[in-house]
Amino acid sequence: MEPNEIELLSVGVDVGSSTSHLVFSNLLLRRDERSASRRFLIEERRVIFEGKIIDTPLVNHHTIDIDKLTDFLKSEYQRAGIAPADVQTGAVIITGETAKKANAGQIVAALSHDAGKFVAAAAGPNFESIIAAMGSGAKERSRKTGQTLLSCDIGGGTSNMAILKNGEIISTSCVAVGGRLIAVDSRGKIRRISEPARQVMDDLGLNLQIGDRPSTRDLDKIAAKLAAVLMEVITGPASSPLAQKLKVTDDLDFPNHIDAYSFSGGVAELIYGGNGRHNDIGKPLAEKINALIPQLNSPVIEPVNKIRATVIGAGAHSLSISGSSGFMDNRITFPIKNIPVIRVDVDRSKLSIQHVVSRIHAAFRRFDRKEGEEIVALYFRDPVRNSYPQVELFAKSIEAALPCSMANNIPIILIFEGDIACSVGNVIRRETTLKTNLLTLDELDLTEGDWIDIGNPLVKNQVFPVTVKSLVFHGQ
């Protein structure tokens, strides 16, 4: 008898500009009896362990201390009583200014290797905005209330924003505003100045250097300017020259009205009255943001999670589950990591071998990729009617479009929005020479530009855990 429930153990690791920490979560998957394929949905996410929060260890301003970081995470696993082999999904997130460090890619590889069987290594400003909105509780609040919320996660190096409407994220953005852009030592002397902070100082006519002891007035000026830029971005569009320089992504796409704003991240702990560290500009930045909040046209609400929003989002909200009718060749080994998603725009009213082949080749060209050189996931929304003649024609089109992939024994991954993966997979095997290295998945909502990890299959190889992410380190 097939199970109706599955429990997965998930880890979230956040290596940020200021701090690093992890959480473990239990994810409960339950079959959706209303679904024709009885697919599994994630019904409950429960945080079971919140680790210590440490300063992100650095060798110098440009390099993360990999040994100290991995030792810390190993000790946290031991404190939680969890073995890496027990972890089934999750995400390692390299965020903010830390993602720019020279050895950030090595960190991703090291942590992914040590943290469990299937841990996605991800970094990227839009992805961080999404998971922070999820981990803070803003997404769930928007879903329950039907409100349009703007979530802003203020970390050490960046502020990540998301607009949520009826529980759906409709826009994201990121700006280089954070509490760790300037760091000082115990004597109040500057020990680090990030490039965005230098741009702010240039705008103010300040010339502070490493080793200087800045006055409270100068730090207040810098914090006030950063707060003004942040307010400009979250009320949008950001038009000042300084805001344009500090923007990491495009502006938010604003709806007609924002019902409420919420802040998360380390600086948010201070915005809502908490105590924090004093070896950076987090405290004056929080004070200046609070001074500008009356300019907002809607109230500010306090989220469920603040400093832990990103790490909780990484551990509990980064997973998607495929439909229950996939098709897999047994010779494919999992997990398969860092797969680019390439959308293929097939018009099923024009279905022909020539049309499908031309659309697949156009998709490869759009991504500057050559068919047969690497694994990709071809994503189709509604390419074919679920009738045998139509599916057979589509199957033969796939065979015709991917000769180099077949010749090079590269896994061919086809993903569909609708519930047709099993039919397509079986017909391809029956009617074409593509007999091996085939994986078809369905009922996944992807976007071109996503990167995915596909984990070990569950429930008699029918259901696949898929982590959707935005990667900085595409070459890993």
Image (spheres, helix red, strand yellow):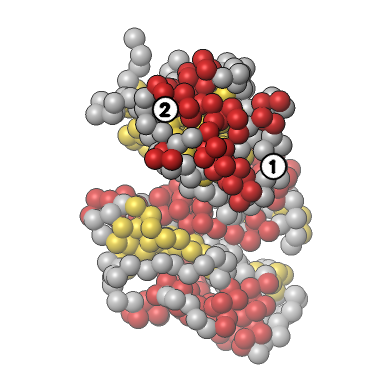
Q: Is residue 4 shown above or below 412?
A: above
Residue nearest the viewer, comparing 357 with 453 = 357
Residue 171 visible (yes or no): yes
Q: Is residue 78 visible?
A: no
- To which residue does mark 1 refer? 370
Q: Mark 1: which secondary structure?
A: loop
Q: Assign the C terminus to one quadrant of the image.
A: top right
Number of residues whose C-alpha sits closer than 10 Å to that of mark 1, classed few (under 14), some (14–19) or many (20 or more): few
Q: Position of residue 88 (x, y in %)?
A: 52, 28
Residue under the image location 45 percent in, 53 percent down: 130
Q: Of tags 1 and 2, which is closer to the observer?
A: 2
Q: The disc labelled 1 sits on which kind of residue?
A: Lys
Q: Relative to 421, is 469 above or below?
A: below
Where is residue 272? Give x, y as percent: 38, 66
**Height in image: 50 above or below 117?**
below
Q: Residue at x 72, y 70 (%)?
A: 191
Which amino acid is tagged 2?
Gln
Q: Which residue is mark 2?
A: 390
Gap in Å between the C-alphas at discs 1 and 2? 27 Å
331 left or right of 284?
right
Total tally of numbered discs in the picture: 2
Label 2 Cα neighbours within 10 Å, binned few <14 / some 14-19 / many ≥20: some
**Which of the two discs, 1 and 2, labels the residue nearer the N terminus?**
1
Residue name at image x 32 percent, y 20 percent: 4
Q: Name the spot of residue 348 as percent of width and height, x first.
A: 41, 39
